[in-house]
Amino acid sequence: MGRERQEDLERIAEFLAGRGEPITIIVIGGTAKALFGLPRRTLDIDAEIACSDEAYAGLLSFLAAHKIPANIGENISQWGTIPLPQGYRERAVEILVKGSVSIKILDPADYVFSKLARGTEIDEQDALDVCAAKEIGPDALRTRLGLVRLPKDPETRFFLDRTERFFKRLEQTAP
């Protein structure tokens, strides 16, 4: 990620702190992986935000004016068919506070599920890297899977198949 995305997060926090309202941002994607201490080049910041409509509109203008590439929305758990494990917001880890603004990253196990839900090769590698670095094994992930409210949707079967393959791969790569 380099310093660029970290600096962008600091600039975003500084801007939002001037709004004087409590705001929480939860960073996901490649930026979160880099914040876990794992090198990852990424083109943008993906994140969830909890704020007023006015703060959100102001943030969008700020991002555009400063040419900060970002996908920031209200509910990352609804970005795809498969939601994140219940309680992900409470487990998110705070990394930066500026006034009433809190910037967090997903708990590592929740991060793995965000990657498995998306399901590309790079997502699977990101998930494997985080599991190795944070010593997360298949048993812990199976427990966390119990917190995912799986929809009655064809994508659920694909997700469960992908997840089981991932668990097997993780077992093979574990020391």
Image: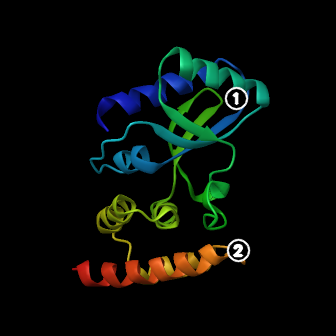
Foreground: disc 2 or disc 1? 2
Of all residues shown, which one is farthest toward the top?
Answer: 65
N-terminal label among 2 and 1: 1
Q: Is residue 101 visible?
A: yes
- Image location of residue 18, percent across then percent down: 65, 17
Residue 14 lies in quadrant: top right
For the C terminus, the quadrant is: bottom left
- Image location of residue 30, percent across then percent down: 40, 47
Q: Is residue 55 left or right of residue 46?
A: right
Say which residue appears at 78% left-offset and 30% top-offset.
53
Q: Is residue 17 visible?
A: no
Q: Which residue is mark 1?
A: 56
Residue 119 lies in quadrant: bottom left
Task: Indicate which disc residue 64 carries.
Answer: none
For the N terminus, the quadrant is: top left
Amino acid type shown at disc 2: Pro
Q: Which residue is mark 2?
A: 151
